[in-house]
Image: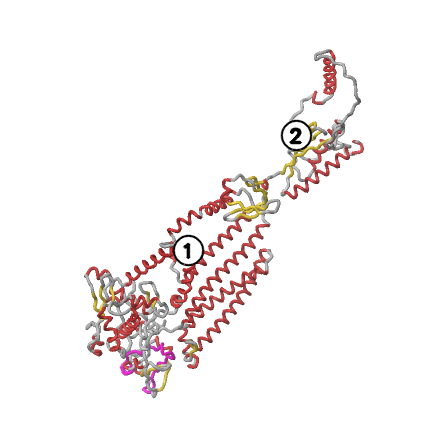
Amino acid sequence: MLQKSSAEQKRAKSHASAGGWAPSPSKSGSPKTRASDENWVWTCRSPKRICLAPGASGLREARARWARAVAGTSARVTLPASAGKPPRACQRSMRRAPATTRTSPARRATRLPAAKRKTGRSHRLGESGTDHLGTRIGAEEYRGAPLDRCAQLPRGRRGGKLRGAMIRRRWLSLFLVALALPSWSQEGGLGQELTEAREAQRAETRARQLASPRATMEGFLVAMNQVWDEPRAWDRAVASLDLSQHPEADGRELVRQLYAVLNRIELVDLATLPDTAEVNSGGLSEWRWFPDRRRHRRLLDRLGQPAGPIVLRQGADGLWRFDAQTVEGIPALHAQMVELPLVAGRELLTLGDWIEARLPSSLTDARFLTVKLWQWLALFGVILLGLIVDLFARILLRLTSRRLAERMKSREDPEQLRRTLRPIGLTAAAMVWLLALRLVELQTTLALILGGALQVFLVLSGTLSAWRLIDLVAGLAMAKAEVTDSKIDDILVPLVSRAVKLFVATMGIVYAADALDVPITPLLASLTVAGVGFSFAAKDTVENFFGSIAVILDRPFDIGDWVVIDDAEGIVEAVGFRSTRIRTFYNSQITVPNSNLVRARVDNYGRRRYRRWKTTLGLQYDTPPDKLVAFTEGVRELIRSHPYTRKDYYQVWCNEFGASSLDVMLYMFFEVPDWNTELRERERLFLDIVRLANQLGVEFAFPTQTVHLFPGEPTPEPGPLPGSSTDRNAEREGIRTAQHLMAEQPWRRERPGPVVFNTGPTELLDDAGNPVEDETAKE
């Protein structure tokens, strides 16, 4: 916004009473004058943007004709050179012209007052300020009747949001219908609570805006500055009137006429109106704002007796409104003042004004479907610009992703990269389109439709871009996690990815609600009762969530482990927020809720350091003892020499007399990383044992039965009785034989110690215990 300099403001203030504009002083101290044959001509192409002419004496006649300049596509007025330097707010729309130029009728854009600053100092619409609702206020024209030019919210970030309110509410209605269908199916449900919450919020806002004469006047002015951007502003403005004697249908016309009257009386100084504290302390029930002989003396001298007063009165409900007498006299008062000039304000130069001032009238005046031709051309240019931004954004991101992939030494997926970059490019294009649409300043329903649609499109494309980007980053992280030794990252990467996606989806819903102007607070308040039932329904989900946290913290298994959980056995494939998926050995998938993992018995075969092998080797009964000793010791040597066996603990002994074989127990462990390696090394050891048996001449037994048939024999004679000499002789023979065998055993000289496992191949020794280097000599 163009502002006056401090020096110019002081000069304007010093001459306010005379209604003149002070000439700029020269270096010598005398006023600057120009040749009598030159004038300043103020030109503005748009009839909605006409700079304010200072009240110099040479312009008094022009000031009387401001209100009649309502036709044509441009307006200009000549300022005599004697008036000095014009205000800075109008310099950009001026040019110099010869003195012969005739003064044309013009009109000024009025600048109505805004809210009082928090510091207590009043300010006016047209000066940059903040109203009591925190809304940024600045000067701009009012697009009402031709004579009612007034201030309006600036077309900034806040203004663009207000202009799209109508179309956002249309989208909002569809969204709320979808949300409220379950509630509307029952009387007194969630839909009724939501409606009651909204009505309560509106009643509270209305009570705050009509709490005092100052609040009523402030709310009326702010609402009238928003009526073309926010349709509900009409309702707020009409609520300021006491329509007890008029139909509701006349409300809009009455507030428009009242606003036009205020534009011609004065810039409202809200500090002169009582606030709530003053009303309560003074016991006021009405406040007459117009006519006031002290403040409106000049207007009354020119106007004479006004057709009606402007009075604010407190109603039975405690709210302040323009009373019925004021409403009754608005049409007559408007007809009396319609020919008066509008009060002064300041010019707000927008980009649309700057563009229109530099384009030919054939583009700025002609319209197609209520939209100016230059705006149609600007829309096509904006669309083209968005497509160019989309293309360049995708190219730039593709080059950046390739460099990152090379730096991380990972292979990029072209299809996934294309799917990720497409919504990002659309998001960039939507941002360009939305920003450019605000700069084009469409003032029709097209602006509302396009603005609301673009905001919704921006939210959807942004959410989809974030979703696809999370998938891309998670894929790179998983590729990195697969080459690490740790298994915790295999669980954390999917969990973090899903958590971030949930956050993105939530934020997308919030921003979509904001784009559609959905009141989030009443909706959340209405869900409190439903939240109780939801908490009971989500009990299992919460348990599963904490179960997944327990799996991460306690780590009973990792991805790829062979586990047995209750009756489920298989390889762990994935761990999610709700469940864990296990791939069985018959290739089916079992889903185990995470809440069960807290209480279940988890047998993790994947955490085994060693993998046991226990079997029995059956040898034929005719195998000599020395062959048995040679075979068992040879198997021990194979275990000690194997690359994947545990060397410090193994058992190979003749253990059982089987039904058809001499059983040798083989009990040992493999030290392998996985089941596939275990099977391979078990086969290797198995084949080595078979080769050892062939070399030693030991035969493996298999279950056989020998049936002996004898011919018939006479009944045998009865044998000796127990305890006879025959038994005693047999016992003595067995004892002597065993003693003979034990007499030559080495342990007779020294008791054997505990078993000691050799951890490597055994060194060959001769009979005397000396190392043998030549195997032929040993044999």
CB under 8 Å between discs 2 and 1: no
Check the image and report above or below for 496 versus 657.
below
* Residue type (three-letter) at the residue carrying disc 2: Val
> How many other residues sit within 10 Å of disc 1, few (<14), some (14-19) or many (≥20)?
few
Q: Is residue 228 left or right of residue 572?
A: left
Which quarter shows the C terminus?
A: top right
Let me know if residue 708 is in the magenta part. no
Closest to the observer, 86 or 163: 163
Closest to the observer, 4 or 143: 143
Based on the displayed image, in which of its 4 quarters is residue 196 positioned? bottom left
Q: Which region shows up in magenta?
A: 35-62
Residue at disc 1, secondary structure: helix
* Residue type (three-letter) at the residue carrying disc 1: Pro
Residue at disc 2, secondary structure: loop
- Residue at 50% in and 59% down: 466
Based on the displayed image, in which of its 4 quarters is residue 34 positioned? bottom left
Residue on which the image places disc 1:
182
Residue on which the image places disc 2:
756
- Residue at 46% in and 68% down: 433
